[in-house]
């Protein structure tokens, strides 16, 4: 499964950004191969519609799930329409959040 995680940095030990639409990066993690790739979030500097832009980006990247601190209603709607599940995490790093996802300890956001 490919998971997009909102981050302030570009690796598994970066801090999770609690924002979805305006986070600096999405860390795309393939949970089967344990590989990851960071992409800059094009929605981060949008004057409006950042949530939808960000949701569209992760859908286009093939994410099947999203982990973030919070999710706006329009972003949630876009992800739900694409069949992408979103989970809340208050963990410090993507590495910790992924472990909780594997243990099914994250709360759904949509």
Image: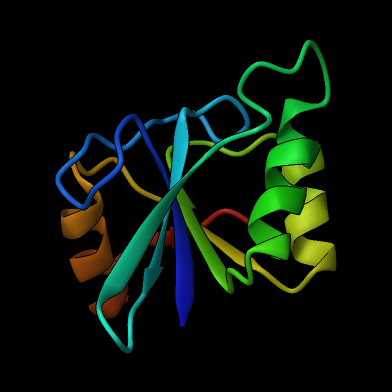
* Horizontal side of residue 95 vs 87, given as left or right: left
Asked whether residue 51 is in view, the answer is yes
Q: Which colour scheme is used?
A: rainbow
Residue name at image x 72 percent, y 34 percent: 51
Q: Position of residue 64 (x, y in %)?
A: 58, 74
Query: Vertically, is 21 above or below 62?
Result: above
* Horizontal side of residue 110 vs 109, given as left or right: right
Residue name at image x 14 percent, y 45 percent: 13
Q: Nearer the viewer, residue 29 or 74?
A: 29
Q: In which quarter of the image is residue 85?
A: bottom right
Q: Position of residue 1 (x, y in %)?
A: 46, 83
* Horizontal side of residue 3 vs 7, given as left or right: right
Asked whether residue 73 is in view, the answer is no
Single out the residue that lies furthest toward the top.
47
What is the quadrant of the C terminus in the image? bottom right
Residue name at image x 29 percent, y 73 percent: 35
Residue name at image x 61 percent, y 23 percent: 44
Query: Vertically, is 25 above or below 5?
Result: above
Q: Where is residue 82 in the image (x, y as percent from the top left)?
A: 80, 69
Query: Vertically, is 105 above or below 91?
Result: below
Q: Which of 73 and 56 is in front in this view?
A: 56
Q: Quadrant of residue 104?
A: bottom left
Q: Nearer the viewer, residue 109 or 5?
A: 5
Single out the residue that lies furthest toward the bottom.
32
Q: Where is residue 24 in the image (x, y as percent from the top left)?
A: 46, 28
């Amino acid at each position: 499964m490919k998971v997009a995680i909102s981050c302030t940095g570009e690796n598994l030990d970066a801090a999770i950004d609690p924002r979805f639409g305006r986070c600096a990066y999405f860390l795309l993690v393939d949970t089967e191969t344990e590989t990851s790739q960071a992409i800059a979030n094009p929605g981060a500097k949008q004057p409006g519609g950042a949530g939808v832009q960000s949701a569209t980006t992760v859908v286009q990247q093939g994410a099947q799930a999203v982990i973030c601190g919070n999710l706006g209603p329009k972003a949630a709607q876009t992800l739900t329409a694409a069949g992408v599940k979103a989970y809340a995490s208050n963990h410090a790093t993507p590495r910790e959040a992924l472990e909780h996802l594997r243990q099914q300890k994250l709360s759904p956001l949509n």
